Image (spheres, rainbow, N blue to C red):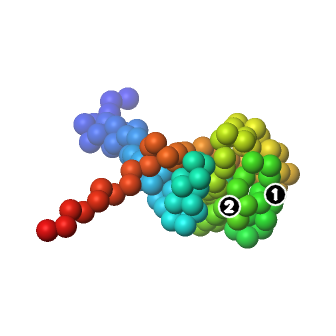
Amino acid sequence: MRLSGSTIAVWLLALQAPAALACGYCVEDRIAATYDFSVVSGALDQRHEVAFFVIQGAGGANGMSGAAISRLLEGTKGIDRNSVRVSVDAASLSFAFDPARAPLGPILNAADGKLHSKGLSLALLRVLDHASYAKPAPVAAR
């Protein structure tokens, strides 16, 4: 069987589609969906960190509301009180934590344990800490 040049071109373009999906815009959109300036600025002022995650599972949040997921994780040891933000539409979640009190690994294990019973898990997207957070430069007065 001999393939034409246009057939080969279509196959080559199809093979590139996954690379186009992983361009980074999806990551930024998911972070933006749960970014809360008051949570981030408050956490960073206290030298806490903010972690952003993808919610993984069959059907996104498996029919759970953002409020239900938030309530499920609010009492997790190490997560700052009232800092959990959930976007069911973007299948993303964020929370603040104090790395000096509890590292992210054990917090993530505890959160995954709670979510596992609902058929969900978390995959880390990004962690904002005081050193990596880019604050705007002061504007000079004229």
Answer with left or right where residue 68 lies relative to residue 93: right
Residue for badge 2? 84
Q: Are circles 1 and 2 on residues that touch, CB within 8 Å?
A: no
> Left of 86 or right of it: where is 24?
left
Q: Nearer the viewer, residue 128 or 66?
A: 128
Residue 61 image offset from top left, x and y in percent: 70, 60
The three-letter code of the residue at mark 2 reads Val
Query: Distance from label 1 to label 2 (Cα)?
Result: 10 Å
Quadrant for the N terminus in the image = top left
Relative image position of residue 50 (x, y in whole percent): 58, 51
Query: Which circle marks residue 75 in the picture?
Result: 1
Q: Is residue 14 left or right of residue 35?
A: left
> Element type at marker 2?
loop
Query: Is residue 77 or residue 89 the one in the foreground?
Result: 77
N-term-proximal mark, 1 vs 2: 1
The residue under label 1 is which amino acid type? Gly
Residue at 80%, 44% (x, y): give it.
110
92 vs 106, nearest the viewer: 106
* Side of 57 relative to 77 (left or right): left
Q: Residues within 10 Å of mark 2 (few under 14, many from 20)?
A: many
Tell me if residue 32 comes above or below residue 9 in the rendering: below
Which of the 4 quarters of the picture holds residue 3?
Answer: top left
- Residue drawn at (60%, 49%) of the image: 48
Q: Residue at x 73, y 41 (%)?
A: 102
| Residue that extends furthest to the right in the rendered view of this protein | 117
Can you see residue 124? yes
Callout 1 secondary element: loop
Q: Is residue 127 above or below residue 81?
A: above
For the C terminus, the quadrant is: bottom left
**Residue 51 placement (x, y as % from top left):** 59, 49
Q: Is residue 40 visible?
A: no
